């Protein structure tokens, strides 16, 4: 039986984890990106502003981690968005669709009681690596 490689991803181009976990793990050709907060990678503090600014920074961190894993937003198959307040759904969607602007991945969005560091937004994803072809079935 062949061995599947489990690659741990860490990049200085995104905020460091705030607990004992990796930014991402690649298993075979699947990338599992841990929840990204709106943290400035240099200060490790949440960016100033509200859910829009935090979502922008969280997505910037997510993109950097995907790149480090030899993937990208075009290879994301599933996103999960966690919001402190579901009333921010529309504002976060406006930021989200600037990054995910075609061939949208599957997605779930939840309001949660509390996020790490009292963040307003957290985004995690599952993506692929290597050559990926997108086909639309209707």
Image: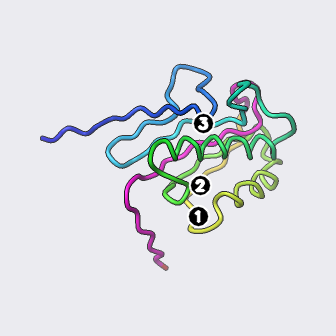
Q: Earlier in the sequence, mark 2 or mark 3?
A: 3
Q: Distance of mark 1 from mark 2, alpha carbons?
A: 9 Å
Pointer 2 and pointer 3: residues touching (CB < 8 Å)?
A: no
Q: Which mark is residue 121?
A: none
Residue pictured at 58% horizontal, 26% vertical: 17
Disc number lying in front (1 or 2): 1
Residue 22 spot, x, y in % from top left? 49, 28
Q: Residue furthest bottom?
A: 138
Q: Quadrant of residue 82?
A: top right
Disc number lying in front (1 or 3): 3
Q: Secondary structure at mark 1?
A: loop
Which residue in the protein does label 2 denote? 107
**Span colored in magenta:** 113-137
Which residue in the protein does label 3 denote? 13
Residue 77 spot, x, y in % from top left? 49, 56
Residue pictured at 80% horizontal, 41% vertical: 85
Residue 123 spot, x, y in % from top left? 63, 42
Q: Quick one: label 3, few (<14), some, or many (20+) residues within 10 Å?
A: some
Q: Secondary structure at mark 2?
A: strand
Q: Distance of mark 1 from mark 3, alpha carbons?
A: 25 Å
Q: Earlier in the sequence, mark 1 or mark 3?
A: 3
Which residue in the protein does label 1 denote? 104
Residue pictured at 64% horizontal, 31% vertical: 15
Pointer 1 and pointer 2: residues touching (CB < 8 Å)?
A: yes
* Residue nearer the viewer, 42 or 121: 42
Q: Is residue 45 positioned above or below 130 on the image?
A: above
Is 131 colored magenta in this rendering?
Answer: yes
């Amino acid at each position: 039986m062949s061995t599947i490689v489990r690659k741990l991803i860490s990049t200085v181009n995104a905020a460091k984890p705030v607990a004992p976990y990796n930014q991402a793990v690649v298993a075979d050709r699947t990338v599992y990106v841990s929840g990204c907060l709106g943290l400035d990678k240099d200060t490790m503090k949440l960016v100033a502003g509200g859910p829009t600014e935090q979502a922008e920074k969280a997505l910037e961190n997510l993109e950097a981690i995907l790149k480090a894993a030899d993937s990208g937003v075009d290879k994301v198959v599933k996103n999960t968005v966690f919001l402190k307040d579901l009333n921010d759904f529309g504002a976060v969607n406006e930021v989200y669709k600037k990054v995910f602007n075609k061939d949208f991945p599957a997605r779930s969005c939840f309001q949660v009681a509390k996020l790490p560091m009292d963040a307003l937004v957290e985004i995690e994803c599952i993506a692929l690596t290597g050559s990926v072809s997108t086909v639309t079935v209707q």
